[in-house]
Amino acid sequence: MVLLEELAKYTLMLFVVLDPPGNAPLFYYFTKDLETKARIRTIRTSIVIASIILLLFATCGQALLNYFGITVNDFRIAGGIVLFLYSVLGLLGHSLAEEVREEDVAVVPLATPLLAGPGAITVVIYTRYVAGLLITLITIAINMVIAWVMLENGERLLRLLGRKGSRILEKIMSILLAAYAVAMIREGMTAILRGL
């Protein structure tokens, strides 16, 4: 019973950080110019890569960060810069499918920092040391399956919005992405300055 309660607690914690419902429009935004098969393949690739990243941090996360001298706040700043660059491309009307290859967008920014970002990495490392490896691995598996199902069904959004609606959403998503990127950079900078 206690095991199930812990599993539910940490699964929910990671779900909130991964935020598949909130990320679904962003995933649509980055894959909308791809053909259906390519879009699904890209999303599945990003899920697999994000899973590998989280599993890596679940097993040897803190040691890995220490070895390279990287902090979670470094991830925040780097991820924020990458997302900000993508948001500028969107605001300028560039098709992201023309700017990056399908396999590239699956890794950055979809797998990381949108899924396996600094928040998810922090939760995974925390869960590993508080609840143990087994709970952490099950938590990651459950959340990746949920994310896969939710993100792969993002195409329904396109059907509901239509062509004009999707263009409006693209601009809104670009602005929100820029704001999210700035927030990530701000959080990283603030945490670093507090530590000085």
Image (spheres, helix red, strand yellow):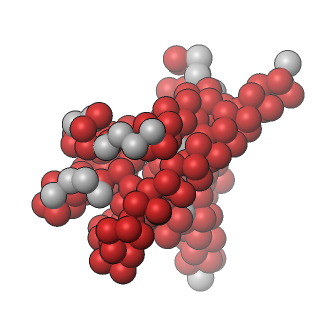
Position of the N terminus by quadrant: bottom right
- On the image, which quarter does residue 125 sit in? top right
Q: Which of 79 and 93 is in front in this view?
A: 93
Q: How many marks?
A: 0
Q: In which quarter of the image is the C terminus?
A: top right
The answer to whether residue 44 of the structure is visible from this angle is yes
Q: Is residue 75 left or right of residue 184?
A: left
Q: In which quarter of the image is residue 183?
A: top right
Q: Where is residue 45 in the image (x, y as percent from the top left)?
A: 25, 50
**Residue 69: where, in percent of width, then height?**
59, 17
| Residue beneath the point at 86% across and 28% down | 194
> Residue at horizontal 52%, vertical 17%?
68
Please state if 178 lies on the left or on the right of 134 as rendered: right
**Left or right of 82 in this view: 50:** left
State the image coordinates of residue 181 (x, y, percent, origin top left): 60, 40
Q: Residue at x 27, y 35 (%)?
A: 100
Please tell me in which quadrant of the rendered image residue 74 appears.
top right
Residue at point 66%, 38% (across, down): 182
